[in-house]
Image (tube, helix red, strand yellow):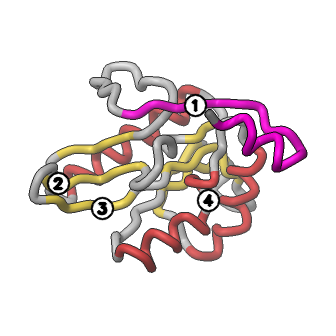
């Protein structure tokens, strides 16, 4: 059975383990990023956890979605995954779980009376509009930091 619920502090080790194990996990998905944004900018977070398991007994995290509430005179009031990063959208073990996380985020966005939901993920979500405002650059890192610095044009 799939359940989606708000993140709770005791979820931290399991959340971060899931992010680190997921091939698309980024530092922007971690709880450390959540805490840095909350402390530095005062934005409230609304992280979502997707779990599978029985009604009784341990559950396994199968997806996560970091969300922050932002307010701007230019852009309005909205939930964003995640501010100050080009990526940080839903991480899930399947398309079904990813879609369920996005649906839950949309419900949360409406319940908070916000203007829109902004997902910053690498792959578009079916049925949602895409803005190509951000660019991601990828390069294999060399173990030698001097070579990495020399590779920057």
Tell me whether the residue at label 1 lies in contact with that at label 4, contact meaning CB atoms closer than 8 angstroms.
no
Which is more N-terminal, label 2 or label 3? 3
Is disc 1 surrounded by few (<14), some (14 to 19) or many (20+) residues within 10 Å? few
Report helix, strand or loop for mark 1: loop
Cα–Cα span, label 3 and label 2? 9 Å
Instruction: Looking at the image, tell me whether mark 1 or mark 4 is earlier in sequence order.
Output: 4
Residue nearest the viewer, comparing 143 with 151: 151
State the separation of the CA atoms marked 1 and 3.
27 Å
**Mark earlier in primary sequence (1, 2):** 2
Query: Height in image: 94 above or below 52?
Result: above
What type of secondary structure mainly makes up the magenta span?
loop
Q: CA distance from mark 1 to mark 4?
A: 20 Å
Nearer the observer: mark 1 or 3; the answer is 1
Q: Which residue is mark 2?
A: 114
Tell me the magenta residue range. 134-152
Crowd band around label 4 with a 10 angstrom C-alpha radius: few (<14), some (14–19), many (20+)? many
Residue to which mark 1 is pinned:
137
Q: Real-space Cα distance between discs 4 and 3?
A: 17 Å
**Is the residue marked by circle 2 packed among few (<14), some (14-19), or many (20+) residues within 10 Å?**
some
Q: Regarding mark 2 in the picture, which secondary structure is present there?
A: loop
Marks 2 and 4, how far apart in space? 24 Å
Residue located at (35% from left, 76% from top): 42
Q: Which residue is mark 4?
A: 30
Magenta includes 135? yes
- Residue 102 in which image quadrant: top left
Q: Which residue is mark 3?
A: 69
Secondary element at tag 4: loop
């Amino acid at each position: 059975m799939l359940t989606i619920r708000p993140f709770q502090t005791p979820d931290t080790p399991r959340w971060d383990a899931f992010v680190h194990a997921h091939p698309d996990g980024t530092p922007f998905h971690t709880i450390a990023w959540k805490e840095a944004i909350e402390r530095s900018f005062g934005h409230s977070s609304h992280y979502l956890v997707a779990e599978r398991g029985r009604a009784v007994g341990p559950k396994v995290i199968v997806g996560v979605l970091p969300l922050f509430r932002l307010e701007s005179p230019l852009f309005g009031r909205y939930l964003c995954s995640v501010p100050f990063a080009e990526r940080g959208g839903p991480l899930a073990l399947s398309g079904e779980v990813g879609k369920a996380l996005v649906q839950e985020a949309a419900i949360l966005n409406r319940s908070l009376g916000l203007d829109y939901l902004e997902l910053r993920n690498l792959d578009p979500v079916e049925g949602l509009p895409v803005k190509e405002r951000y660019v991601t650059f990828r390069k294999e890192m060399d173990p030698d930091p001097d070579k990495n610095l020399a590779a920057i044009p």
